[in-house]
Image (tube, rainbow, N blue to C red):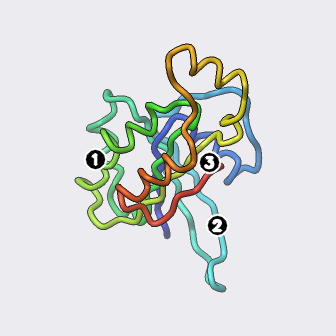
């Protein structure tokens, strides 16, 4: 079994697409969800267990209990929310290193299609911001020593 944990509010949509084959337009907040997906890797069947955990501070102690036996952590951020990338370095990486030293990390940029969306650009510009560029995510991936940097 391969256990994978994701951190970020948009990861639920990513998990739905991967495990159920569809994208939902309605955001449904989760506290702890477990998605199981069987896949073949090098002619061997592997049970992939994906854990979608709440990121709010109220769940910090509870969330820490779910790290046991984790093989891979996907730290997710949304390109239309620059603070979510900042949180990778200011919150998530410290928690991951504390509870899962040596675990493989993948940094995932979510909502990449919104980078050039004029509505998103205008909304962020009103507050002096802009969507997260590919290079910014890549720089964070290097600093946290992620094995991969992916975008969806």
Q: Residue at x 71, y 40 (%)?
A: 113
Q: CA distance from mark 1 to mark 2?
A: 28 Å
Q: Position of residue 111 (x, y in %)?
A: 64, 39
Image marks 1 and 2: residues in contact by CB distance under 8 Å? no
Residue 127: x and y in percent read: 50, 16
The residue that mark 2 highlights is: 38
Residue at the spot of label 3: 15
- Dot 2: few (<14), some (14–19), or many (≥20) neighbours within 10 Å? few
Q: Residue at 32% x, 49% y: name it.
A: 93
Residue at position x 62%, y 51% from top?
151
Dot 3: what SS? helix
- Callout 3 touching callout 2 (CB < 8 Å): no
Decide which of 135, 6 is in the foreground and name it. Answer: 135
Question: Nearer the observer, disc 1 or disc 3?
Answer: 1
Q: For residue 79, which quarter of the picture? A: top right
Q: Which mark is residue 95?
A: 1
| Disc 1 packing (10 Å; few <14; some 14–19; many ≥20) | some
In primary-sequence order, the first of circles 3 and 2 is 3
Residue in the picture at 58% in, 73% down: 46
Residue 145 position by quadrant: bottom left
Query: Which residue ends up furthest to the bottom in the rendered image?
Result: 43
Earlier in the chain: of badge 1 and badge 3, it is 3
Distance Cα–Cα, label 1 vs label 3: 22 Å
C-alpha separation, residue under disc 3 versus residue under disc 2: 14 Å
Q: Is residue 124 above or below residue 4?
A: above
């Amino acid at each position: 079994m391969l256990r994978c944990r994701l951190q970020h509010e948009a990861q639920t949509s990513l998990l739905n697409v991967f495990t159920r084959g569809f994208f939902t337009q309605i955001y449904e907040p989760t506290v702890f969800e477990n998605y199981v997906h069987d896949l073949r890797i090098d002619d061997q069947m592997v049970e992939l267990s994906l854990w979608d955990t709440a990121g709010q501070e109220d769940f910090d102690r509870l969330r820490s209990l779910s790290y046991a036996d984790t093989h891979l952590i996907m730290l997710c951020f949304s390109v239309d929310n620059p603070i979510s990338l900042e949180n990778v370095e200011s919150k998530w990486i410290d928690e991951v290193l504390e509870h899962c030293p040596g675990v493989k990390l993948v940094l995932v940029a979510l909502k990449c299609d919104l980078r050039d969306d004029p509505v998103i650009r205008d909304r962020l510009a009103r507050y002096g911001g802009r969507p997260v560029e590919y290079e910014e995510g890549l720089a964070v991936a290097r600093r946290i020593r992620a094995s991969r940097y992916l975008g969806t």
